[in-house]
Image (spheres, rainbow, N blue to C red):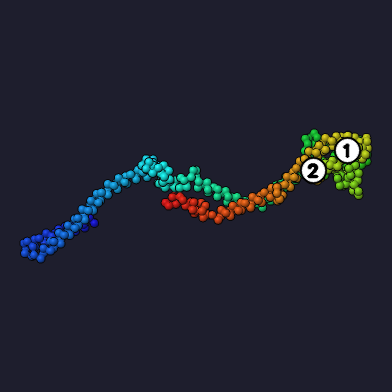
Amino acid sequence: MGLQAFYGVFIGFGFFALLGALLTACCDKYGCRYLMYFSCVFLFIVGLIGFLIATIISLIIPATTWGCSFLDVTLASDAGFTANLQTALGASVANQLKVCMPFGHGRIIDSIASGSSMDALNNLTGVINGLGAWNNTQSQADITTSLNAFINTVGTWCRGEVVDLDSTEYSTLVNIANPNYASWTSCGAPFSSDSWVPSNSQNSSYSPIACQSSSGNVGDTTTCTATLANNGANTCGGCMDSTLLATSITTANINTHLNSRYGGTCGFNTPMTNIWTNYYTVKNTALGPTDTAGSGSGVYRRALDVQATTINTANPGLFYSMNQLDVRIQSINSTLSSISSLTDANTGLIAGLNCLLFG
């Protein structure tokens, strides 16, 4: 439509020029010459402008055509960009510009620094945020609960509450606990009311050896002296806790005390002395004293030392170190929060250095 109007104007003014000439020459209408003059001047000016425009366009079109063809090849692929611009711009600049090209990944920071720097920053932020979710109080409570359970388990073995023997030795201890066993002959009166068991607090889940005394009394470090006599007003007899008594009666003295209690001809004394020497005393030496924290290098002592060091909130306790770590983690989180406008993975300034955000 525009082109048709353009040509229509030229034709119209050409007609006016012709009409003015005819009226002037043929009809003696001399005043019409001005219509011819105006039309001629107008057509001349418009023609001159058209000539200039055509000249300019004829210069621009080849450059535009060649430029667009150049850009089509350059922006279409990494290979085309490298071939056309890398020599002129240099490898460093070209590689950074490639990031924002249609074939680029859009992460400017990655093109400046080696590796996936933005991903690394986001991962670091995620790790710190994860550490911030760590509940120090709950962690210490969980450790304390687990450690107490461990200590209690160790204690049950140390106190003889779990009988850690194979079937043959287990049967021997069953016989030891039975005052009516056929081999126990020529024993004094107290023997029939005594039953020597590994512990008076055995764990029912591990085949305990039952006490076979009905006297209702117990023999342990509270009721018995180191000579198996009554400790003050207490009665030393009944269910005899061998593991606890082994902490106060030595291997060298046990046979003497048994002879004194049951008589020197009692058939029980020699087997019990052998068990005392080769089981109860050896076990207490390896595991540690069973009624108290004890001392030395026994397992029970070392376990209690570990527990004490772990829950200690003073240096060098584990809980002290955990408290110090918690303080530092909270400080890091506070600092990270203060620069969130810089490091936020979605809206931070560093994330903003990404031409994918600009479309």
Task: Give the quarter of the image for residue 206.
Answer: top right
- Whichever of callouts 2 and 1 sits on the residue coming sooner in the sequence is 1
Residue in the foreground of this view, choosing between 27 and 71 = 71
Residue at 8 percent across and 65 percent down: it is: 29
Determine the residue positioned at 86% across, 47% down: 222
Q: Three-letter amino acid code at disc 1?
A: Ile
Q: Residue at x 49, y 51 (%)?
A: 350
Which residue matches tag 1?
254
- Side (left or right) of 73 relative to 144: left
Of residue 72 and residue 90, the one placed in the foreground of this image is 90
Give, as a three-letter code, the residue at label 2.
Ser
Quarter of the image with the N terminus in it: bottom left
Spot occupied by residue 259 in the image (x, y as percentages of width and height): 92, 37
Left or right side of 307 for 359: left
| Residue identified by numbered label 2 | 295
Circle 2 residues within 10 Å: few <14, some 14–19, many ≥20: few
Secondary-structure class at tag 1:
helix
x then y, percent, for residue 13: 16, 59
Looking at the rendered structure, the secondary structure element under dot 2 is: loop
Q: Quadrant of residue 186?
A: top right
Q: Position of residue 304 (x, y in %)?
A: 75, 45
Measuring from the top left, give residue 16's x and y in whole percent.
14, 61
Q: What is the CA distance from the residue labelled 2 to the residue labelled 1?
A: 22 Å
Q: Which is closer to the viewer, label 2 or label 1?
A: 2
Residue count near mark 1 (Cα–Cα under 10 Å), binned few <14, some 14–19, many ≥20: many
Left or right? Give the position of 125 relative to 29. right
Camera sees residue 13? no
